[in-house]
Amino acid sequence: MGSKGGSKYRVVDYYMGVHYGICAGPVDALLGVYIKERDAWPGKTKYDDDSDQGNSNDNAPIVSFKDFIASLGGGNTPTATSSVAVAEVVLDINRPDLFGGDKKEGGVVGKMRYLPGGPGQVLPTELAAKLKTIPSKAPGYRGVASAWFYGAGKNSFMWCQNNPYLPPAWFTVFRRPKGLTQSKATVQRLNYPPDANPAHMIYECMTNTDWGMGSPATLFNVASFEACGDKLLAEKFGLSMLWNDQATIEDFVKEIVDHVQATVFINPRTGLWEMKLIRGDYDVNTLRTLTPDNCDLTNRQRKAWAETINEVVVTWTNPTNEKEETVTFQDIANISMQGGVVSDGRNYYGIRNKELATEVGARDIRSASYPLFSAEAECDREGWDLLPGDCIKVTWPEDGIENVVCRIGKVDYGRPGDMTVKVSLVEDIFSLEKAAYTAPPTTGWQNPDRDPEPMAYRQYFTMPYPAMVAAGLDPLAAEGNYPRVVPGFFGQQNDPGTYNFDLYGPVTNGAGTVIGSLGTFLQTNLSILAAPMAKEAVTTISKANLGTIWGQADDPIIGDLIYIGTGTDAQCEIAMITGLNNSTQTYTLRRGCFDTVPRAWPVNTRLWHVNDTWGAYDDTERLAPAAIPYKMTPRTTKSVLPLSAAPQDTLNTVPRPYLPFRPANVKVDGVDIFSATGKVYLATPASIPITWANRNRLMEDTVVKSWTDGNVTPEDGQLTGLRLRSDTGVVLTTINDLPGTSYNLDPGVFGGEPFAYLELFSKRDGLESLQNAIIQIELRLYGYGYSYGEDYGENDGY
C-alpha cells in the first residue's frame, strides 16, 4: 500500500568554500571523491563493467578507468564505469539528492578543482583571490595534492541542506612508487583497482629525500629489490596503504614486510641493503648443513600442540566501500587434536582483494598450526656469510634431527675478532606438505546503500467512486464538481534499498503550470501471477500462483483488494480476497468488483495489493478527460533519483467516479459470460432471452457486490442498454433505456450475420459504464438435414 507525504516545509542550504589538503604529492590520479561516505564523483565505483567512459586522449585530464590501467603497464587492463582524473582539472559535482534530497539533508552542488601537487603547480586565480593576492605571488602548494570546492552560491560549494554541520570529504587517490622500473610499480588483479608493488614501496620509503629515510641509491642492491618486485608482480601481490608522519617510516616498512613476509637487511659481503622474500624457492639438495662439527646448537625446542594456533582470521580492506572484511581459515586436524578452537587475528589492511587475502590466510594457517622446531646456533667463521631469510639444513644426532630445513632469522655477526656468528633458526614451513585452500564464496548479500534507479513497476488509474470514499475524499463534493477526478497510482521497485518515492506532476504556481512535487509515498505491494487466471466470477488461487508479494512481509488478509493488469482503466480488473484456507494454502477471490468485469489473465500479469484505503493518490484538482504527465523518483538510503532521469508516464483520465456501474451476472438464454467456449449457441430462436442484475455505485462504498449477486435498485435515472456488433466490429443495433433486468432480443437484428457480440452497458445522464460484459452469440444455420452435420452445409463460412 502507499501513503501520502507530509506538508511543505522550509529548506535551508549551507554553502562554504573549502580548500582540502589530501596528501603529499604529486599523485598520479584521483579515483573518487566521497562526501559523508557517499560517492560525489564520479558517482559510481565499479571495477567489473564493460562500459568505457571518459576520454582516451593521452593528454586529457579525465580518462576512463580502462585507459588509466592500460597506461600503468603490466597486469590486467579491465574496463570500468568510473572515470579517473589524471591531471589538474575542474570537476562538476551535481548531486543535490546525495543525502536524500530536500526532504532530508539535501546533497552537494558546485565545482571542485583537483590540484595533484606537481612541481609547476600554481593556484587558480579564484583561489588566489581568496588569499587576497594573485597566482604568481600565492603559494602553489607544490608537493601537496589538494582539492578546492567552490562554484555554487556566492562562488561557494553547497555541502548539505537542513543540517548546519560540514560533512567530511574523503578522496581516493593513486600514486605509483618511484625509484624502480615504473612499468612494474603497480599490481592489478582483474575486477579490482590497482595496488602498489610492495618491493617498490619499500625502496621508495628508504630512498625518498622528502618524506622517506633519504638513503642514497648507491647503498642499495637495486637488483634484489627489482627481483622481489618481479616476484610479487607474478604473484599479483599488491598493497595500498596510507602512511602519515605520526608513525615512523621504519615502522611503516615493517608493516609492508609483515604483509608480504620478507626481510630487508644489509649484506655483509657487499655492505648494501638487500631485500629477500620468504618463499619456498630453494633446492633442498644444495643447502648447507649445520652439524655438531661446525656449530653449537642451543635452546633446541619444538612447540607443543597446545602452543599452536588452529584458526587464523585475516582482516582485509574492501575497496568498494573502504570497510574491513575478514576471511577465516582453520586447521581441522589441529582443532580435533586440541579439542577446541584457538584463534588468532591478522590485520592485513593493505590487502584490498579477497583472493589475495585468501592466499595470505592459507600461508599463515600453515605456519601457525604446526609445532615448528626452533633453535639458536653459534657457528664458526664458516657462517660469516649467512644472511637473514636464507635456508639451511640442520642435523643433530643427539636429538634425532636429520636434515631439517630451517629459515635463518636474526643474524649476529659479532664484533671484529669474534670467532663465531650467532643465528636464530626456525623450521621452514615450505619444507612441509602444503594444504590447498580456495577463496570462500561470496555471501550473495548486496549492499542496499546504492544509487536509485527508475521505478521498475508503475501503474496509474482514475479512482472509482468507492475508492474515493475509502480514501476519505468527499464524494458529494466530487459529485458536485464534475468532471473533477482523483488519479491513483502504484509504484514498486522490488529492491530492499528503495523505501519510498516522490511523485511529480503538473502544479500551478506564479510561473504557470510546471512539473512539481506532489508528495512522498510508500511503495505498493506487488506480485506477479505465476499461472494463468481464468475468466470467472470466483477464483480459488494457490499461494504459489499468487506469487511472491514484493514489499509485504505478511500474507494477504480477507478484505484486501487486488488491482489486476497494466493497461488503461477500461483494461484492468479489481478483485477482492474473500476467503483463506490455511490447510490448502489457497485464497478465494471475488472477481470483477465495482465497475470492472472478470476477464482471463496470462502468466506474469501484475497484481497490485491494496487495502481498503487505496494508498497513494494525487489530490490535486484534476479533470476528465485529460492527459496528465507523471514521474516517480525512487528514494534509497543513499539518495533520490534525479527528476531528469525518471521516465515520464501519461494517465488519460476518464470521469470514472461518475460513471454508472455495469450490469452484472449477464446471461443469454441462461448461459453466462464464463462458458467454456466463450459462445452461446442458438438454433433458429424466435427470440433471444437476455437477463442481468443491476448495480448501484453509491451502494458499494461499504459492501462490495459479487458478480453473481442478485439485482439491486439502480441509481435514479440509470437504465440498461445493449449493443450488438458483427464479427468485424460493425454495430448492428443499439437499444437504450431498458428497464428491469431482462429483455428478449429479436434475432432479425443480426441482419443475416451468423456471429455477433452482445455488449450490455449501463447509462445515466448521458454517461455510460466504464466496462461492459460481452458475450458472443452464434446462430446455428443448418444445411443438409438436421442431423447430417452442423458444419457440412452451414453457411457461416466455417
Image (tube, rainbow, N blue to C red):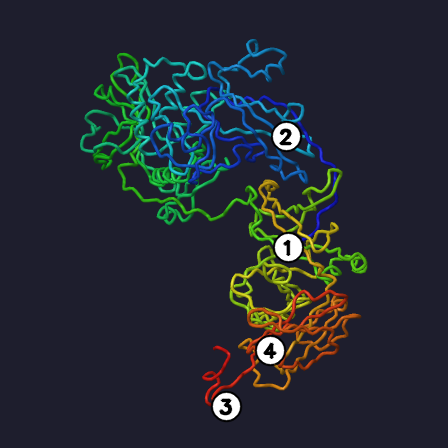
* 3D distance between C-alphas at marks 2 and 4: 76 Å
Residue type, mark 3 in image:
Tyr
In which image quadrant can residue 397 be found? top left
Q: For mark 2, what is the residue?
A: 159
Tag on residue 618? none
Q: For mark 1, what is the residue?
A: 460
Residue 379 drawn above or below residue 364: above
Tag on residue 751? 4
Residue type, mark 4 in image:
Gly
Q: Residues within 10 Å of mark 2 (few under 14, many from 20)?
A: many
Q: Is residue 134 left or right of residue 354?
A: right
Q: Upstream in the sequence, badge 3 or badge 1?
A: 1
Which of the pair 340/554 is nearer the observer? 554
Residue 623 drawn above or below residue 397: below
Question: Dots 2 and 1: beta carbons under 8 Å?
Answer: no
Q: Nearer the viewer, mark 3 or mark 1?
A: 3
Tag on residue 786? 3
* 3D distance between C-alphas at marks 2 and 3: 88 Å
| Element class at badge 2 | strand
Which of the pair 729/591 is nearer the observer? 729
**Residue 315 appears in view:** no
